[in-house]
Image (tube, rainbow, N blue to C red):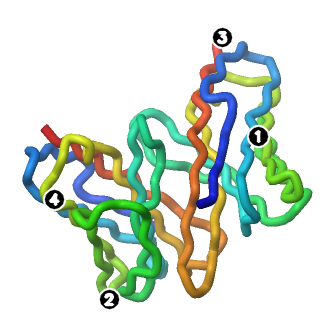
């Protein structure tokens, strides 16, 4: 079974600082997703990374994918309080015959302190 | 364009009862997947439906079942509820199973007492 490890589990950072969340997965996958979840809310799609070396940026968040290392990173630049949330990475296997399935990491609970 | 709609949003049930949750995907989307989210186990895959057929199933007991209708709406059913079934149940829809993007609904918060 595909395993997805995410670290750190908890992250408390000051506003204005930079940090990186790491996502490792155990076997080859078709694609890598990053989601954000606010307390009591659903999952909001942030990025979809489809190929080795893919880099995507949206505001203060930047995600990258290294399929050879089976590693994705979510980099936070100059954090602001609004970024406080739980961030999940997910790896998808999308097979025509057997259907598709997302494997989620444990999530990183990010708190940005003023 | 309406998003993924899950009903009800909140539910309280007693042990031993059964429950049915509903998910209406984004218009035009034909693939629906269900996930269970708990503090202890995180997000776990339940099942995936496409064209009224279950194509994939996660590692859950037979008490968990689902179906998809011709209009792509999906229901999941949990029978003989246990305390451990208390969770946020999330539904995701996509155009086709191999489509890149999956969009999640707001979820149904089930509490078993």
To which chain does the residue with label 2 belong? B
Instruction: Find residue A98 and report its image quarter.
Output: bottom right
Query: How many neighbours does mark 1 have within 10 angstroms: few (below 14), some (14-19), or many (20 or more)?
Result: many
Q: Is residue A107 visible?
A: yes
Q: Secondary structure at mark 4?
A: strand
| Residue A49 or residue B41, whichever sits in front | B41
To which chain does the residue with label 3 belong? A
Instruction: Find residue B74 and report its image quarter.
Output: bottom left
- State the count of labels: 4
Where does label 2 land, which residue? B70
Q: Residue furthest top?
A: A114
How far apart marks 4 and 3 lie (CA) works out to 43 Å
- Of marks 1 and 3, the one in the foreground: 1
Where does label 1 land, which residue? A74
Where does label 4 land, which residue? B19
To which chain does the residue with label 4 belong? B
Would residue B28 be found to the left or right of residue A97 on screen? Answer: left
Q: Residue at x 19, y 63 (%)?
A: B20
| Image quarter of the C terminus of chain A | top right
**Looking at the image, is A87 positioned above or below residue B51?**
above
Query: How many neighbours does mark 3 have within 10 angstroms: few (below 14), some (14-19), or many (20 or more)?
Result: few
How far apart marks 3 and 2 lie (CA) works out to 50 Å
Would residue B8 be found to the left or right of residue B37 on screen? Answer: left
Where does label 3 land, which residue? A114
How far apart marks 4 and 1 lie (CA) works out to 38 Å
Q: Secondary structure at mark 2?
A: loop
Q: Residue at x 53, y 73 (%)?
A: B94
């Amino acid at each position: 079974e595909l395993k997805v490890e995410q670290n750190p589990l908890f992250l408390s950072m000051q506003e204005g600082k930079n940090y990186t969340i790491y996502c490792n997965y155990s076997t080859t996958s078709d694609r890598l997703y990053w989601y954000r979840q606010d307390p009591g809310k659903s999952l909001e799609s942030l990025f979809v990374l489809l190929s080795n070396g893919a880099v995507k940026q949206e505001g203060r968040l930047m995600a990258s994918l290294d399929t050879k290392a089976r590693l994705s990173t979510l980099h936070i630049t100059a954090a602001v309080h609004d970024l406080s949330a739980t961030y999940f990475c997910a790896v998808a296997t999308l097979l025509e015959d057997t259907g598709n399935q997302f494997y989620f990491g444990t999530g990183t609970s990010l708190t940005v302190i003023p | 364009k309406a998003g993924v709609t899950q009903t009800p949003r909140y539910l309280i049930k007693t042990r031993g009862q059964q429950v049915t949750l509903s998910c209406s995907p984004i218009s035009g989307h034909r693939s629906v997947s269900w996930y269970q989210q708990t503090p202890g186990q995180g997000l776990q895959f339940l099942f995936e439906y496409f064209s009224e057929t279950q194509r994939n199933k996660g590692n859950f007991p037979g008490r968990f079942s689902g179906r998809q209708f011709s209009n792509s709406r999906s229901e999941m059913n949990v029978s003989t509820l246990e305390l451990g079934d208390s969770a946020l149940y999330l539904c995701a829809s996509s155009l086709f199973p191999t489509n890149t993007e999956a969009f999640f609904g707001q979820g149904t918060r089930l509490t078993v007492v």
